[in-house]
Each structure stands twice: as C-alpha cells, then as structure tokens.
C-alpha cells in the first residue's frame, strides 16, 4: 500500500507530497474541503497545521481530518499527467 513519507505546505491549500513509491508532487485540496470535519481547514492557519501520520501513512490535522493516501496519490498522479511541471525527482523516472 502506498503511503506518504513527507509533506510540506506550499501555499493557500496546496501541499507538496512524497510517497513511498517515489512519486512526488503538489496537490491543491481547496475543492476537497467540504463536510463537517473539513470545514475548519478553510482557515489557512488551521490548514497549515497538518502533519504526516506514520501509522495512517497520510497527512492529518489536529481536528481528526485526513485524506486517504490513495486519493492523494491519485490526485498528484493526475496533476502530473495533465502536464504540470514535474519535480526533478519525477523527471528522472
């Protein structure tokens, strides 16, 4: 199962992620912040408070919100496929 090994805040609702299979890239989560648990993340200060949770292999927030690593992996892959500029590490593959 693929999981997140590193994550960094980029800007707004964009996060850079590196996965256990070597894939890395950015994902914009702005359109995914709906529903009771995700509503607080619309506050940029709250959104930036995520961390990598090794036991879940994904990013999570103090209020309990998280995204499935498979969903995030697919989102990064789709963004790279659409022609966004890949990172140096993904260009090597």
Image (cartoon, rainbow, N blue to C red):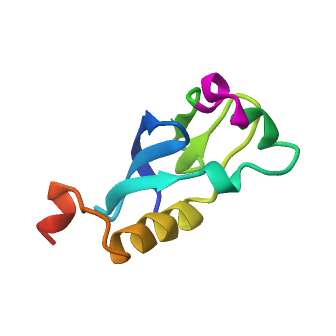
Residue shown at 67% from the left, 47% from the top: 66
User: Where is residue 8 shown, x and y percent of the image?
Assistant: 40, 37
Q: Is residue 56 above or below residue 69?
A: above
Q: Residue furthest left?
A: 92
Look at the image and tell me whether residue 19 can be seen: no
Relative horizontal placement of residue 33, taking residue 17 as reference (left or right): right
- Residue 35 magenta: no
Please name whichever residue, 84 or 7, is drawn nearer the observer in this view of the structure. Answer: 84
Residue shown at 55% from the left, 59% from the top: 69
- Residue 44 magenta: yes
Q: What are the residue bounds of the magenta stretch? A: 42-47
Q: Is residue 77 above or below residue 17?
A: below
Relative horizontal placement of residue 66, taking residue 52 as reference (left or right): right
Residue shown at 58% from the left, 66% from the top: 71
Look at the image and tell me whether residue 42 can be seen: yes
- Residue 11: name its quadrant: top left
User: Where is residue 25 shown, x and y percent of the image?
Assistant: 35, 56
Residue shown at 78% from the left, 33% from the top: 40
Image quadrant containing the C terminus: bottom left
């Amino acid at each position: 199962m693929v999981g997140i090994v590193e994550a960094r805040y980029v800007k707004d609702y964009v996060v850079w992620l590196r996965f256990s299979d070597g894939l890395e890239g950015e994902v914009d989560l702005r359109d995914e912040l709906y529903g009771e648990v995700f509503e607080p993340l619309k506050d940029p200060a709250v959104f930036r408070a995520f961390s990598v949770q090794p036991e879940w292999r994904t990013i999570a927030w103090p209020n309990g919100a998280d995204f499935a690593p498979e969903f995030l992996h697919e989102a990064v892959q789709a963004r790279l496929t659409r022609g966004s500029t890949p990172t140096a590490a993904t260009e090597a593959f």
